[in-house]
Amino acid sequence: MKTLALGIGMAALLSSAALADDMITATPQSLKWGPAPPFFEKGSEITVIAGDPFKSGEYTLRLKMPKGYRINAHFHPTTENVTVIKGTFHIGMGDKIEPKSGTTLKAGGFVSLPAQMHHYAWASTPAIVQVHGQGPFAITYINPADDPRNRK
């Protein structure tokens, strides 16, 4: 019986050690921020915490926005999960920004947006949101003129 218990204990310990090798940790000080990709308006910054948002698989990233920053109506091919880390962030559903129809989320607030759902967002204070989901991440603007990649 002792041998069986020791064997189970060793297996659990080895399994935990293997999982620890895959563990990802991040502190605010360890995050490396840079300009957001060109499908976002200028002025925002991004940091990837885990995974690669542009490949298949899980990813976690953060988006930092200045006060007044807007993300025009768009949708994604996969579910988008957003948690507000800092500031005041607004989210609404539809084909154009309607500030009176949006929901206000403060730090700790969360929203899960199903694939293909038309939505928009804006920050009324400097804000940081954490986005996680299954990649690849892609964004399609409802009005192609709203897509910063289409502007010269």
Image: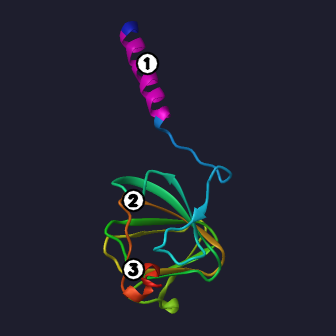
Q: In the image, what residue type sits under mark 1? A: Gly
- Whether the residues at callouts 3 and 1 have beta carbons within 8 Å, the answer is no
Is the residue marked by circle 2 packed among few (<14), some (14-19), or many (20+) residues within 10 Å?
few
Whichever of labels 3 and 1 marks the residue nearer the N terminus, that label is: 1
Q: In the image, what residue type sits under mark 2? A: Phe
Which residue is label 2 attached to?
54
Q: Looking at the image, is mark 3 or mark 2 nearer the viewer? A: 2
Instruction: Indicate the secondary structure of the residue bearing disc 1.
Output: helix
Instruction: Indicate the secondary structure of the residue bearing disc 3.
Output: strand
Residue at position x 58%, y 72% in the image: 44
Q: Label for residue 74?
A: 3
Magenta part, dominant SS: helix
Q: Is residue 81 magenta?
A: no
Quick one: quadrant of the N terminus?
Answer: top left
3D distance between C-alphas at marks 1 and 2: 39 Å
- Whether the residues at callouts 1 and 2 have beta carbons within 8 Å, the answer is no
Q: Which residues are magenta?
A: 4-21
Q: In the image, what residue type sits under mark 3? A: His
3D distance between C-alphas at marks 3 and 1: 51 Å
In the image, taking residue 34 as reference, residue 58 lies left or right, namely: left
Residue at position x 45%, y 74% in the image: 39
Residue 109 x, y percent position in the rendering? 54, 68
